[in-house]
Structure formats: C-alpha cells, structure tokens
Image (cartoon, rainbow, N blue to C red):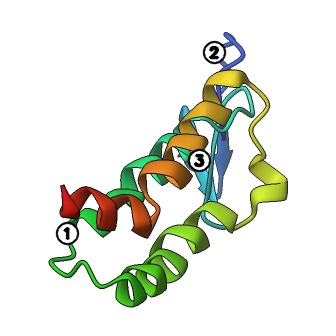
Amino acid sequence: MVGSDGSNAVYSFSDQAIESVDVVKDLGVLVDSKFNFFQHISDITKNTKILRCFLTRDPFVLIRAFKIYVRSLVEYASPVWSPVSHAQIEKLHCVSKNGHPFYFFYNSLK
C-alpha cells in the first residue's frame, strides 16, 4: 500500500499485514505516496551518468551508447511520469544536455 493517510488502519491479505511504504515501483516507474515522480526522475538522472564510464571518445560509439542506455531510460513510460514542475524539467534537461555523447566528445578535446 502506498502512503499513509494518518490513520492507524492495518490492512492484511491472507492473515499477512501489508506494510505502508513511501515509494512503490510499478512497471519500472517509481511513484511516491502523493503520486509524484520525483524519485523516478532522480533515479533516471543518476542512472544516465553511465556514459562517463566509457573510455572511448569515438562519436559513433558514444551516440549508440546514448541511444541504448540513456534515451531508453528517459523515454520509457514518459507519458505516465511526464514532468510538470520546473525543477523536474530542468533536471531532465541536464540529462539530455550533459549526457549527450557530443558533450563528452568535445570536452575530451579540451
């Protein structure tokens, strides 16, 4: 069960108590007790830093890695968790800007 309404109600299933949690993952999307997706967007931005571990600066390899590892995370179920607050939009914008393969390629030339 997601969230807590402040009551002390205990729900059970087959004589097993169901614990109340703050965040639930459903079909790969994290949802908190107020049906916000802040945790999901934070996990996406954290997981998209994978491109930094690539030793190559070959644009072809980095573009493919971006499409496979980063874009797929950002686009998965995006109509469900589409950001509405300015902070969430900016956080995802940083992923697309800083996580883009050309960002790493041009920074390696400096």
What's the residue at 66%, 41% (across, down)? 1
Front residue of 24/8: it is 24
User: Which percent across, then down, holds residue 107?
Assistant: 26, 56
N-terminal-most mark, 3 or 2? 2
N-terminal-most mark, 2 or 1? 2
Res 8 label = 2
Q: Is mark 2 on a helix, strand or loop?
A: loop
Amino acid carrying mark 3 in the image = Val
Instruction: Compute the Cα span from label 2 to label 1.
Output: 47 Å
Q: In which quarter of the view is residue 102 placed?
A: bottom left
In this view, which residue lies farthest toward the top?
Answer: 6
Total label count? 3
In the image, residue 13 above or below residue 105: above
Can you tell which of label 3 and label 1 is closer to the viewer?
A: 1
| In this rendering, position of residue 83 left or right of residue 67 | right
Q: What element carries label 3?
A: strand
Instruction: Compute the Cα span from label 3 to label 1.
Output: 29 Å
- Residue neighbourhood size for the residue with mark 1, other residues' Cα within 10 Å, grouped as few (<14), some (14–19), many (≥20): few
In the image, residue 10 above or below residue 42: above
Residue denoted by label 1: 53
Cβ–Cβ under 8 Å for marks 2 and 1? no
Q: Which quadrant is the C terminus positioned in?
A: bottom left
Q: Is mark 1 on a helix, strand or loop?
A: helix
User: Which percent across, then down, holds residue 81?
Assistant: 75, 48
Residue denoted by label 3: 24
Q: In which quarter of the view is residue 22 placed?
A: top right
Residue 96 can be seen, yes or no? yes
Cβ–Cβ under 8 Å for marks 3 and 2? no
- Residue neighbourhood size for the residue with mark 2, other residues' Cα within 10 Å, grouped as few (<14), some (14–19), many (≥20): few
In this view, which residue lies farthest toward the right?
Answer: 79
N-terminal-most mark, 3 or 1? 3
User: Which percent across, then down, holds residue 103?
Assistant: 39, 58
